[in-house]
Image: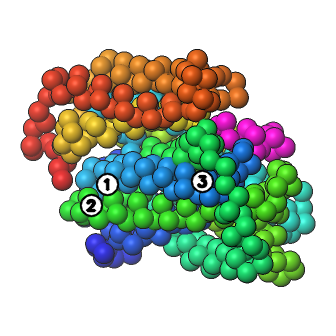
């Protein structure tokens, strides 16, 4: 695994940089830490519940598992391609959007990303609050507040601590999941569940969409956690480390969720955490599993809070023309972000499951076009060559507003609407397709091809001396 050793003085425990470029002398870390970070981020209760939704909403066990795996592989590849940008650019993920949207225009997708983080952080806090409540016998609301305090504290430390937490939670997650799967297989007739098959395109593609949306939602911040790797780190190895970690972790969680929902039936709704823990045992072992649930959520919730901070800082820096963020500003941003997500969690904790399904599926409408545009531009238009200095200069080569990129993005969002199927809106093509939502497929292919065709002819060559290049 690629690794660079630095002295402790060069790598303080509390991160000193924010969204600014990471110089080569400060690069460190290993591909192994990328794998463990994304494995730990996915071995957690929200991923379990996401998998369970495939059964709760009408799918059978076998075809739900297959659909989830297909979506996992597809979405995981998209995420891993974004991750490979981190070592090459040395910058957070969303700053690279300034190439496609302009220094000011990048605020459009970034604001939507912030809303995504708030939503995921809030839903994670609800589930973690339930676990803490069971563990120390307090109310769910008190559990949410305790969990939020821990997340704010860890996020203050930044990059190195986040990776350390990822390693710890990945080990604990593996132990907990091996135990749960062992109990599941020995105490239940899994073969009987797998034999109950009733394939339907709608429920099958719902499973694909659930896992694909879960993975693609990591895209806007995955490079934030690979940007400290040495710039010579192999893009293929970064892709593999992140891809394996996120796909293996998420699929293990969602498989467990499918079995749990199938066994629990109607009792799963409103008792998600208790149902999962109940697969294991009672007494001391149950307490340890509740603790594992909380620790499993710590990694991804810290990622969400840290990613939110990066996004807010990116928007502000774009309008003020410089990248530096002071320690006080950093602290205030993090407290504001965690406070907002905690408020949402407290207000919406009693309607979690139904709201969460529609939330994660609707995310695809806004993030698949961004992901397609970003990846096509980086790998096929500019071919991993960006003028890093110009990313913070509104008067530079990328300008304030890139009308071309913004128009392709807006078109990409709008073209999905006929194919969207949500609780509050159903497009006219959904019925024609037998109730199947294929909006995310349209949102990846059409904007990606559209952007390539229009950007290829207008892209300016980046001067080699001002380029971060693979």
The residue identified by callout 2 is 236
Residue drawn 28% across the image and 72% down it: 2
Rendered residue at 59%/76% (across/down): 174
Query: Could you tell whether 267 is left or right of 463 in the image?
Result: right
Q: Give left or right: position of 153 versus 17.
A: right
Based on the displayed image, in which of its 4 quarters is residue 28 positioned?
bottom left
Question: Mark 1, mark 2: which one is toward the viewer?
Answer: 2
Q: Who is closer to the viewer here, 388 or 303?
A: 303
Looking at the image, residue 171 sits to the left or right of residue 441; the answer is: right
Residue segment shown in magenta: 345-359
- 396 up-or-down from 227: above or below: above
Q: Estimate the x, y position of residue 344 in percent, counting from the top left.
A: 74, 39
User: Horizontal and vertical percent for residue 373?
Assistant: 34, 33
**Residue at point 68%, 70% (across, down):** 191
Which quadrant of the view contains residue 255?
A: bottom right
- Using the rendered image of the protein, determine whether residue 287 is visible from the camera's viewpoint: no
Q: CA distance from mark 1 to mark 2?
A: 7 Å
Secondary structure at badge 2 equals: helix
């Amino acid at each position: 695994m690629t690794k660079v050793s630095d002295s402790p003085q060069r790598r303080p425990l509390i991160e000193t940089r924010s969204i600014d470029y990471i110089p080569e002398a400060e690069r460190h870390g290993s591909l192994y830490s990328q794998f463990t970070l994304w494995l730990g981020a996915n071995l957690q209760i929200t991923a379990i519940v996401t998998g369970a939704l495939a059964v709760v909403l009408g799918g059978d066990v076998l075809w739900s598992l297959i659909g989830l795996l297909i979506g996992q592989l597809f979405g995981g590849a998209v995420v891993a391609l974004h991750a490979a940008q981190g070592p090459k650019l040395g910058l957070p993920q969303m700053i690279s959007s300034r190439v496609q949207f302009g220094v000011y225009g990048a605020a459009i997708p970034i604001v939507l990303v912030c809303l995504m983080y708030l939503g995921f952080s809030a839903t994670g806090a609800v589930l973690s609050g339930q676990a803490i409540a069971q563990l120390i016998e307090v109310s769910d609301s008190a559990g949410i507040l305790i969990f939020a305090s821990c997340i704010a504290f860890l996020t203050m430390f930044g990059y190195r601590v986040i990776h350390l937490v990822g390693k710890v939670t990945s080990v604990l997650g593996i132990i907990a999941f091996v135990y749960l799967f062992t109990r599941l297989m020995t105490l239940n007739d899994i073969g009987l569940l797998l034999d109950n098959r009733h394939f339907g395109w709608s429920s099958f593609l719902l499973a694909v969409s659930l896992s694909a949306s879960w993975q693609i939602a990591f895209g806007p911040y995955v490079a934030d956690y690979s940007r400290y790797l040495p710039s010579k780190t192999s893009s293929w190895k970064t892709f593999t480390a992140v891809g394996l970690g996120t796909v293996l972790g998420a699929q293990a969680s969602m498989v467990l969720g499918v079995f749990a929902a199938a066994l629990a039936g109607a009792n799963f709704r409103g008792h998600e955490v208790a149902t999962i823990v109940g697969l294991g045992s009672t007494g001391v072992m149950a307490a340890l599993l509740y603790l594992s649930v909380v620790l499993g959520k710590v990694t991804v919730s810290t990622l969400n809070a840290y990613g939110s901070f990066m996004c807010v800082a990116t928007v502000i820096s774009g309008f003020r023309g410089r990248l530096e963020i002071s320690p006080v500003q950093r602290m205030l941003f993090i407290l504001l972000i965690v406070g907002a997500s905690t408020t949402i969690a407290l207000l919406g904790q009693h309607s979690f499951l139904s709201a969460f399904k529609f939330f994660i599926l609707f995310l695809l409408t806004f993030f698949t076009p961004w992901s397609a545009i970003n990846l096509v531009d980086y790998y096929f238009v500019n071919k991993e060559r960006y003028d890093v200095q110009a990313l913070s200069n509104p008067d530079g080569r990328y300008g304030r507003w890139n009308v071309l990129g913004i128009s392709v993005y807006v078109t990409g969002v709008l073209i999905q609407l006929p194919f969207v199927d949500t609780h509050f809106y159903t497009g006219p093509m959904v019925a024609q397709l037998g109730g199947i939502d294929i909006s995310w497929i349209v949102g990846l292919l059409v904007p990606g091809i559209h952007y390539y065709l229009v950007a290829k002819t207008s892209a300016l060559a980046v001067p080699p001396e001002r380029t971060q290049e693979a």
